[in-house]
Image (cartoon, rainbow, N blue to C red):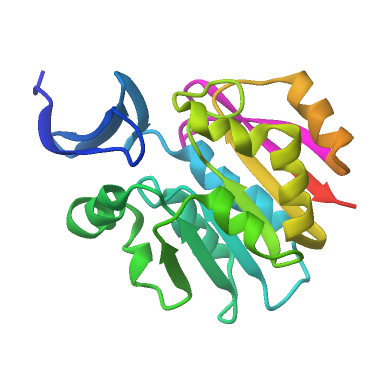
Amino acid sequence: MIPWQEIDRAQVPGQKENIILQKRGQEFSIRIAGTELMNSRIHGSEDDLARLTFSCLKGKSDLRILIGGLGMGYTLSAALEQSRPETVIVVSELIPAVVRWNIEHLGHLARMPLDDPRVTVEKEDVAKIIRKQASAWDAILLDVDNGPEGLTQKANECLYSRSGLETSFLALRPGGILSIWSAKASEAFTRRLDDCGFKAKMVSVRARKSGKGSRHIIWLAQKS
């Protein structure tokens, strides 16, 4: 088997851990603290995060979309496929190295989504962007960490706490969608979303585009 080759590493802002980009043949992997966060061979559920979100927004125009977490660009690419010419997409990516890797190493995997003029990248914590303005977004897509029940970074808890969800509720326009990717299911988190005013459902999807692989979870929570 071809061994993994380390391409680059960088310190996570505000943390001691390094985030590492590796390559094996044509396969790429991003890891932190010994945990694989994403792999270029397994991105079906990241695609579904965008596809399912946009299916809830049919008929709406002049959409403003916030994506938390650039990753390898698959969710962004899938969002662009669903978007009209006037759609505005802002991607929040806290780790500058991840943005650089997408430009230098990973862009071809998802058809160079950062080159699309509808896209703006903010190198800032998505939680800060959400707090900036009420009724600003038609959809907020969060692919941050491993979801509310699989955190590798303690700081990400603020997104999934009751106060964090209430802030996202305020940041959405009426009828807006908060969609969340997770490695694990959680009925308790569904109830938390409902308690914060959302009408939430939990959808199980496959990790691979082929419909195979492990199951991941996407929450679709609509602002009533």
Task: Pick whichever, 193 or 29, lies toward us.
Answer: 193
Question: Where 152 falls versus 163 (above or below)?
Answer: above
Placement of the N terminus among the 4 image quadrants: top left
Is residue 91 shown to the viewer in this render? Answer: yes
Question: Where 46 falls versus 110 (above or below)?
Answer: above
Residue found at x 30% / y 55%: 99
Question: Where, by quadrant of the figure, is residue 217 drawn?
Answer: top right
Q: Position of residue 67 (x, y in %)?
A: 54, 54
**Left or right position of 47 against 22:** right
Residue found at x 54% / y 59%: 79
Q: Position of residue 65 (x, y in %)?
A: 61, 63
Question: Where, by quadrant of the figure, is residue 57 drawn?
Answer: bottom right
Q: Position of residue 161 (x, y in %)?
A: 69, 32
Task: Pick whichever, 184 or 33, lies toward us.
Answer: 33
Give the main secondary structure of the magenta stretch. strand
Question: Where 167 falls versus 65 (above or below)?
Answer: above
Residue found at x 78% / y 44%: 166
Q: Is residue 211 magenta?
A: yes
Q: Position of residue 9 (x, y in %)?
A: 17, 37
Question: Where, by quadrant of the figure, is residue 140 drawn?
Answer: bottom right
Point out the residue furthest to the bottom here.
86
Is residue 56 shown to the viewer in this render? Answer: no
Q: Which stretch did the figure color magenta?
A: 200-219
Point out the residue furthest to the front here.
14
Residue found at x 88% / y 33%: 195
The image shows a total of numbered marks equal to 0
Q: Is residue 98 magenta?
A: no
